[in-house]
Amino acid sequence: MTFNILSCDGGGIRGFLSARIMQDLQAKTGFLDHVDGFAGTSTGGLIAIALADGRAQGKDMTKLIDTIVGIYRHDAGKIFKELTTTKFGTAVEDLLEALGLAGGAGILSAQYSPDGVHDIANSLVQDRTFGSIPQDLVLAVNTAALAMQLPPDARDPAKPDLRNWGPVTLSNHAVGNAFGQDTLGLKLRDGALATSAAPTYFPPHSIEISAGHSMYFADGGTFANNPVMNAVEIALASDSKRHIGDLQILSVGTGLQPLAITNADANDWGPDYYGVLEWFGAGEIAPTAGLLELTLSASAENQTRIAQALFKDNLVRLNPFVPASIKLDSTDSAIFGVMNNVVAAMHSKTPWSQACKMLAGWAQ
């Protein structure tokens, strides 16, 4: 009997594309009712948390994925709501915007308030915890925690509590986290905020791990924007009788897209000229949020390459090419039509047929 995993990449508003893919697959195969493991990073983490909670609560999974699609389509402005900053910070941001050098990532502070993500997560999972997901299911959500102790020979005796950032997979099982804390009592909405706290877009999310002890968390896309291998880790570590050959995986991306830079730009004013402002999206040459886009894309494709080598036909990857550059934080209504067209075009492609064939087997 197979153990069926759904893995959801990060990608900001492009999570709409992932959700639409799942919506169409659910209509054809009903696969969400037969997923055993839900994994996600960033925007994909929010999707994975909502779907795992839906299964745990016995929700109608078709209606739930419809709701998630609707949230992306209609609440983008709520998700990406400007963070109130100092007067000086606002003045600098306004000046950069007037000069055409701003947009997306914040320069002096995080660009957006996390309140919208909090409200949306709360509407989906309320006050429930990771421990509310039953043990026969797996939920794996990537985030980076400011929790890793420095090596003994690098510690300053005068500052014994110094920490570094490190990878963490929040789970409903007591495995997979590297910071020595039980995650079962963590609120699911905190997990959603932690995994989606993209640097410069949203502030790191603070979670009270134990009485009087809080930790900061940032976007899991900083190390594994495609969470497929973290899902495999938790699935195998949580059940000693489960083997790698038992796993089948549907990995859903947020789309491959061209960078907003032409060949002429690359030749005349290319990466040789990228400085801090360019990499962070406040220059004239590099694409908006170029450094974060590089991190998200490269880490996702690295995980894909490793997983495909290991799982071969037991993994189907759906990550279509998007013929337009869609910013992580775009609220332009036109982008949803672009992504809908991409999903419709997928139906005639080989990966779609492979996915439908695999998912049909999950119901048997």
Image (cartoon, helix red, strand yellow):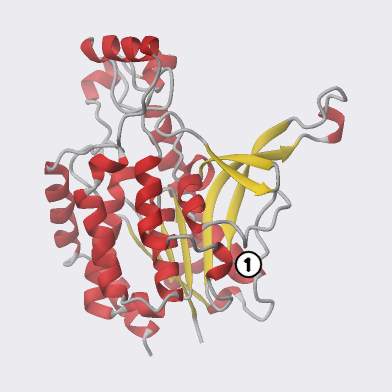
SS label for mark 1: loop
Q: Nearer the viewer, residue 294 or 180?
A: 180
Q: Nearer the viewer, residue 52 or 100?
A: 52
* Image side of residue 21 versus residue 345, left or right: right
**Where's the C terminus, which quadrant?**
bottom left
Q: Amino acid at mark 1?
A: His
Specify whether residue 351 is in view.
no
Q: Residues within 10 Å of mark 1 (few under 14, many from 20)?
A: many
* 25 is higher (above) or lower (below) than 292: below
* Image side of residue 45 versus residue 131, left or right: left
User: Residue 221 appears at what percent x and percent y?
Assistant: 47, 43
Tell me where residue 7 sits by quadrant: bottom left
* 54 is higher (above) or lower (below) than 177: below
Tell me where residue 101 sits by quadrant: top left
User: Residue 134 appears at what percent x and percent y?
Assistant: 55, 75
Count the marks: how many? Answer: 1
Per the image, the residue denoted by label 1 is 173
Residue at the image position 51 percent from the left and 50 percent from the top: 190
User: Residue 88 appears at what percent x and percent y?
Assistant: 38, 9
Residue at the image position 30 percent from the left and 57 percent from the top: 18
User: Residue 314 appears at what percent x and percent y?
Assistant: 45, 73
* Image side of residue 217 versus residue 69, left or right: right
Residue at the image position 37 percent from the left and 79 percent from the top: 33
* 154 is higher (above) or lower (below) than 92: below
Specify whether residue 302 is in view.
yes
